[in-house]
Image (spheres, rainbow, N blue to C red):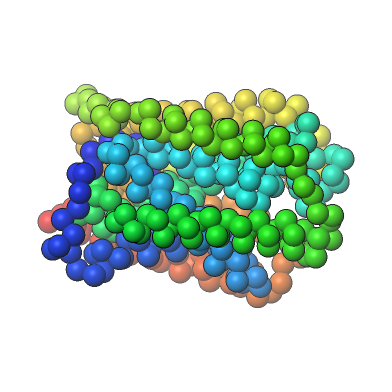
Amino acid sequence: MSVREELPAPTSPSASLTRWQRLGPILLLLFFAPLSGELLSGATRLSYIFVLIPEIMVWGVGALLIREAVRRTRRGWPSLISLGLALGVAEECAIQQTSFSPIVGLDPLHIYGRVFGVNWVWFFALIIFECVWIVLVPVQVVELLFPSRRNHPWLRSRGIVISSVVFLLGSCIAWYLWTQRARPIAFHVPIYTPPLAYILAGLVVILILIAIAFSFRADSGPPIIAARRAPVPIVTGIAAAILSVPAFLFIGLNFMPRRLPPFWISIAAGIVWAVLALAIIRFWAASPAWSDMHRYALVFGALIACMASSYVSPGWLRLDFIGKVVINVVAVILLILLGFVLKRRSAL
């Protein structure tokens, strides 16, 4: 997840592109966004793999539209982060509404950080997770695979309209499957309808984040400072893995039976961690030595942390456990192969 700005060209020379060069980045991002955040983490299991379809419609198309908006307006990673947070808020407050409804599997009267009908710790943890592992990491991986198209839009006007319709349709399907089917049937908890004012408040937050995203100038990236030194890629990857672990710890706080500090302390600590992680990456990205291998190391470390830190319940089916192991192993192999490709490319 490099935060260095590389100004995209306003248009892409699509006439000289092959079909794969035009469609490949789109298809890969559509699939990799839910793969990164859902399948690799174990949040989506093989026993109900059918939900991957609405996840592609929401997460995949959402990540694609966010990337398209950022590249078309010639903005960079600060805008991508803000829009990624907006997508997370949309999921938590409007689509599946999991930050408003009582968390399944827990005593609804004793949910950590649930105040005034909002699961604040869950909300904070999930919008960070969804921003990073649904938007930032997948976009970076696909752009590493297609470096010649990194700075160009991928969709035409018709594609944007179709994608927007698919996103809205997928959001409705995801809302119905979770709030009207999964909660009462699979988890045996009553259907929960948040107050309309809460959903409207979430929409206001989304609009604010969108406004922030487009308030950044196209040249708002960190300047290249000759005296800056970036660590070698392997150190960057290890640091990315370590910096990623707190994201999963904050999610886990919601399910810990032991006594925990006041929820606002946990959220404050999380904000400090997020700002520190971003500051470290921005500091390194300002080095003239920052390269695709450093970007690759960042996403490699983040994805390894996602796979290793995910929660596997004793109640999982054998199929689900084996499926997660296989998917994770295949993902690691493909990431290693990507590293070889990038290393060979940098040597040319």
The answer to whether 322 appears left or right of 146 in the picture is right
The image shows residue 258, relative to residue 68, as above or below, that is above
Q: Quadrant of the C terminus?
A: bottom left
Above or below — where is 55 with respect to 242?
below
User: With 287 as the anchor, is 297 left or right in this view?
Assistant: right
What count of labels does the image hold?
A: 0
Is residue 73 visible from the viewing direction of this image?
yes
Query: Residue at point 38% right, 51% down?
Result: 139
Q: Is residue 88 above or below residue 334?
A: above
> Residue 274 in the image: x percent, y percent?
51, 32
- Is any atom of residue 233 visible in this view? no
Q: Quadrant of the N terminus?
A: top left
Q: Residue at x 41, y 60 (%)?
A: 162
Residue 49 x, y percent position in the rendering: 60, 70
> Can you tell which quarter of the image residue 333 is in?
bottom left
The quarter of the displayed image where residue 19 is located: bottom left
Q: Residue at x 62, y 61 (%)?
A: 173
Q: Please give the name of the residue rendered at 33% of the width and 46% of the height, measured from the top-left corner.
A: 295
Q: Quadrant of residue 154?
A: bottom left
Give how far across and how far down residue 199 sits, in percent. Answer: 67, 39
- Of 316 and 131, the residue lying toward us: 131
Closer to the camera, 37 or 240? 37
Residue at the extreme bottom: 319
